[in-house]
Image (cartoon, rainbow, N blue to C red):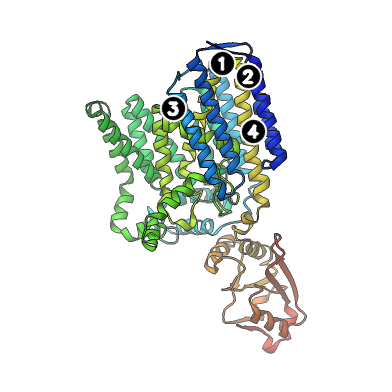
């Protein structure tokens, strides 16, 4: 027997606090507030062990193996925090070492501790409601300013909604720029009927879907973990996740998919685990419905198919007896639900697959004449959670990993546990499948947070697995359970603070977050809406623009000014007669700095012009210029006309 004294337990956490302090002083790789959060986490456990504990030697060493594994995973996260590609190999080596210690832990004296803490049902419901309120608040707070503008995809989605509202035709797939199924657009049309054709109406679909996905995730976790504490913890993690918040505040199709995928997995696992035919019916319907939202649910179907196949291979007789009828019900309901879309795909195969063909990894494989692009994507997507994330400012805080440092450590631990421990294998399989939408697409955009948004709930399941196993370990020490509650609460609130700070403070200050929402087009659209009553407005097409493509910005302006304002584009030849300027102060010409011929012509013919320059506040560069020419000046021009030639 080995006696583990409480003073050793306290000394260990004091040692960890000292190490973190020294590292921060030497390298300063963490923000100070994050260091304080780590202090709080360690301090919450420092008095957990209230008495000396006797362990068998094997049991004691198994605990040491787990602690060593966790320390090595912390070291991995610390190495990754430098965002230096040259250090990745050291991080990978560290996590592999931690993996070995975890194997030793689970193969020594491991026992599942069922002495878990529970929560009264009424308290659980109250906390769930509070979590939902927090989640909704974080998805609507300061929505006018964050994100910084409307992106082309959102504007294009809005134009498709306008087409639906203006036409009686009912379609299941939109083959134009969108090249996506139409469910999002019909729901958006409903919100536009209520709130008007505004970006808020479109984003409301994602806000509602994102908020409901928190609730759906709670029920999924309640089934998987059979414990209200873990299901509430998971719902809170999802509610405060920067990754999830980002796409809950954009008029993209993906958040609707996330909601339907969670609902599908909830009913699917209940059908499999409890052998319930009614749940098989609901899961088939949810999966079929999800196919009308986005492409990522296709991979949920792949998971269900292979999961059933593996059960069949392992125990054929048992599968035929208990699961075959469940799978048949699920598949038939799924097929009935998707039949209209399936029929459309058969008739319009090229339109239906056009987007997938454009972004397929096969393009890179053909170009490189090698499967190396696949391995590059696997490398990038496996590291996107802890090392370096999406470069696109619309999807992510520029280059930052998708998870905060605390959730990142827990994710790595949970991922390794899911590889080792048999009853967690299905989550490893789920995670791997839901990464495929990213892995199977072109290298140039990898890693892309949006394409793997379907993996978001699975990532937080892995985080919860880590939390559960840490608490399982602490329960063996038989300390004061009150401190376990405090420990879990501090972990949850620490991750929330980091994510909220990153999204609402750091994200708006990031240049990529500003530039990737086309500030030029958004500024012009705002100007048109505010000034069209006073001025006849002409906008330069500007093929050589400050940012992005003309056709992208044209869609943004079309959506922003729909039923609100009028303007025209400058053509090779423009003639605006006086009768068009009735009740107008004059003309406002929106010009880019690259429109040198326009600028020269305007300044020569109308030397008394007034102008206003609009700049990029990150670098002071001029994005566009507005020339104001009043009606009196135009009347004095030749033939009382304003004529401008390209």
Q: Is residue 289 left or right of residue 7?
A: left
Mark 3 vs mark 4, foreground winner is: 4
* Numbered badge on residue 224: 3
Above or below 273: residue 53: above
Mark 3 or 2: in front is 2
* Residue 179 visible to an observer of this rendering: yes
| Location of the C terminus (image quadrant) | bottom right
- The residue pinned by badge 2 equals 9
Residue at image position (58%, 36%) is 75
Q: Nearer the viewer, mark 1 or mark 2?
A: 2
Q: Considering only order in the chain, which callout, 2 or 4, is on the residue closer to the N terminus?
A: 2
Instruction: Between label 1 and label 4, give the one nearer the viewer.
Output: 1
Q: Nearer the viewer, residue 238 or 567?
A: 238
Is residue 546 placed above or below 276 in the rendered structure? below
Q: Earlier in the sequence, mark 3 or mark 2?
A: 2
CA–CA distance in space, label 1 to label 2: 10 Å
Query: According to the image, label 1 marks what residue?
Result: 477
Q: How far is disc 3 from disc 4 in space, using C-alphas? A: 25 Å
Q: Mark 3 and mark 1 in contact (Cβ < 8 Å)?
A: no
Q: Which residue of the protein is positioned furthest toward the bottom in this rendering? A: 638
Res 491 → quadrant: top right
Q: Residues within 10 Å of mark 1 (few under 14, many from 20)?
A: many
The one nearer the camera, 404 or 527, is: 404
Mark closer to the chain start, 1 or 4: 1
Judge from the rendering whether residue 159 lies leftward or rightward of residue 592; answer left or right: left
Circles 1 and 2 in contact, beta carbons < 8 Å: yes
Rounded to the nearest whole Å, what is the CA distance between mark 1 and mark 3? 26 Å
Residue 494 marker: 4
Q: Give coordinates of residue 28: x percent, y percent.
A: 70, 42
């Amino acid at each position: 027997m080995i006696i583990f004294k409480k003073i050793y337990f306290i000394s260990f956490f004091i040692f960890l606090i000292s190490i973190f302090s020294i590292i921060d002083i030497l390298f300063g790789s963490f923000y100070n507030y994050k260091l304080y959060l780590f202090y709080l986490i360690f301090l919450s456990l420092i008095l957990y062990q209230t008495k000396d504990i006797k362990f068998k030697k094997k049991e004691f060493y198994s605990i040491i193996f787990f602690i060593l594994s966790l320390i090595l995973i912390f070291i991995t996260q610390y190495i990754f925090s430098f965002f230096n590609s040259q250090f990745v190999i050291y991080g990978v080596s560290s996590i592999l070492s931690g993996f070995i210690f975890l194997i030793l832990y689970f193969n020594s004296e491991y026992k599942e501790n069922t002495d878990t803490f529970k929560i009264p049902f009424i308290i659980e419901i109250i906390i769930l409601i509070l979590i939902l309120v927090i989640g909704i608040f974080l998805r609507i707070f300061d929505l006018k300013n964050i994100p910084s503008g409307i992106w082309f995809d959102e504007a294009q989605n809005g134009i498709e909604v306008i087409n639906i509202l203006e036409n009686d035709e009912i379609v299941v797939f939109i083959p134009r720029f969108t090249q996506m199924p139409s469910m999002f657009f019909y729901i958006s049309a409903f919100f536009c009927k209520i709130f008007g054709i505004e970006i808020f109406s479109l984003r409301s679909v994602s806000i509602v879907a994102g908020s409901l996905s928190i609730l759906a995730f709670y029920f999924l976790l309640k089934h998987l973990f059979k414990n209200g504490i873990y299901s509430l913890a998971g719902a809170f993690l999802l509610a405060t996740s920067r990754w999830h918040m980002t796409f809950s505040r954009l008029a993209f199709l993906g958040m609707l998919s996330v909601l339907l995928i969670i609902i599908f997995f909830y009913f699917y696992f209940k059908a499999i685990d409890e052998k319930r035919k009614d749940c098989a019916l609901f899961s088939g319907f949810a999966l079929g419905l999800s196919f009308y939202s986005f492409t990522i649910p296709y991979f949920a179907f792949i998971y269900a198919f292979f999961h059933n196949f593996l059960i069949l291979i392992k125990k054929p007789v048992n599968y035929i007896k208990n699961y075959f009828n469940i799978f048949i019900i699920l598949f038939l309901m799924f097929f009935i639900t998707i039949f209209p879309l399936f029929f459309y795909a058969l008739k319009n195969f090229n339109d239906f697959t056009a987007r997938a063909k454009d972004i397929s990894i096969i393009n890179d494989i053909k170009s490189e004449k090698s499967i190396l692009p696949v391995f590059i994507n696997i490398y990038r997507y496996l590291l996107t959670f802890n090392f370096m994330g999406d470069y696109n400012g619309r999807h992510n805080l520029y280059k930052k990993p998708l998870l905060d440092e605390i959730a990142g450590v827990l994710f790595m631990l949970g991922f390794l546990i899911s590889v080792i421990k048999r009853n967690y294998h299905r989550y490893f399989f789920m995670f791997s499948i839901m990464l495929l939408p990213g892995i199977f697409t072109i290298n140039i955009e990898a890693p892309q947070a949006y394409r793997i948004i379907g993996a978001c709930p699975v990532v937080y399941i892995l985080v919860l697995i880590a939390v559960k196993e840490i608490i399982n370990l602490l329960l063996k020490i038989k300390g004061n359970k009150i401190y376990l509650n405090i420990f879990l609460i501090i972990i949850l609130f620490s991750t929330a603070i980091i994510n909220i700070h990153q999204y609402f403070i750091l994200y708006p200050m990031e240049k990529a977050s500003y530039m990737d929402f086309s500030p030029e087009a958004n500024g012009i659209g705002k100007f048109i809406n505010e000034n069209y009553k006073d001025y006849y407005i002409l906008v330069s097409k500007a093929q050589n623009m400050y940012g992005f493509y003309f056709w992208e910005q044209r869609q943004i302006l079309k959506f922003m000014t729909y039923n609100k304002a009028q303007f025209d584009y400058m053509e090779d030849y423009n003639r605006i007669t006086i009768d068009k300027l009735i009740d107008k102060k004059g003309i406002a010409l929106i010009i880019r700095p690259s429109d040198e011929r326009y600028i020269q012509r305007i300044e020569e013919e109308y030397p008394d012009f007034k102008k206003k320059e609009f700049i990029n506040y990150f670098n002071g560069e001029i994005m566009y210029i507005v020339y104001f020419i009043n009606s009196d000046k135009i009347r004095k021009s030749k033939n009382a006309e304003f004529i401008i030639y390209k």
